[in-house]
Image (cartoon, rainbow, N blue to C red):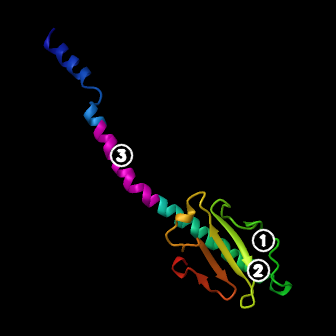
Amino acid sequence: MNRKNICKYNNKRMIGMTLIELLIVVVVIGVLSSIAYPSYQSHALKSHRNLAKSDMLKLQLLLEDQYNSGYSWSNLISSGACTVCESSDERYTFSITSSASQSYVITATAQSGKGQASDECLPNNNQMTLASNGEVTPSECW
């Protein structure tokens, strides 16, 4: 073999990755994903919570639009499912109640099926409320 052929032979052998290099890449990807995934989960929960809040405000506007007809919400909520909302029924269920002190209270309850109940901003009952006078609970979530 002449010198030219030896160089070509060595170049062909060096084409690939060693096992150590591959393991280092896998470890780096694992570390990055372990840091990024909790942040992604938190962002997803917050975005679904914000969508539920906007749906509650939409319900409030529709109820106020029907003020003269006595706050009829039978066409807005059906078995916990909001008919005009963009939120998924798997994330939140909505209800509207009235009492002597409030014309209506809109409640969004986080469901545990998709992990929405683990939202740190929501209290132990996993509910957000919006009253007819504008009071909201929990106030730190709004």
Q: Position of residue 82 (x, y in %)?
A: 73, 67
Q: Quadrant of residue 69?
A: bottom right
Span of residues in magenta: 23-40
Q: Position of residue 137 (x, y in %)?
A: 58, 81
Horizontal placement of 89 versus 23: left or right? right
Residue at the (31%, 46%) spot, across then down: 28
**Disc 2 to disc 3: CB gap under 8 Å:** no
Q: Give the residue pinned by disc 1.
A: 76
Residue 29: which disc? Answer: 3
Amino acid on which the number 2 mark rests in the picture:
Leu
The number of callouts visible is 3
Q: Split into 4 quadrants, where in the image is the C terminus? A: bottom right
Residue at the (74%, 86%) spot, across then down: 99
Judged from the image, the secondary structure of the residue bearing numbered disc 1 is loop
From mark 3 to mark 1, how far is it between C-alphas? 47 Å
Name of the residue lying farthest toward the top: 1
Name of the residue lying farthest toward the left: 3
Classify mark 3: residues with Cα within 10 Å, few (<14), some (14-19) or many (20+). few
Q: Split into 4 quadrants, where in the image is the N terminus? A: top left
Residue at the (82%, 71%) spot, across then down: 75
Q: Position of residue 92 (x, y in %)?
A: 64, 65
- Whether 12 is drawn above or below 65: the answer is above
Instruction: Considering the whole magenta stretch, tell me its main secondary structure.
Output: helix
Residue 63: which disc? Answer: 2
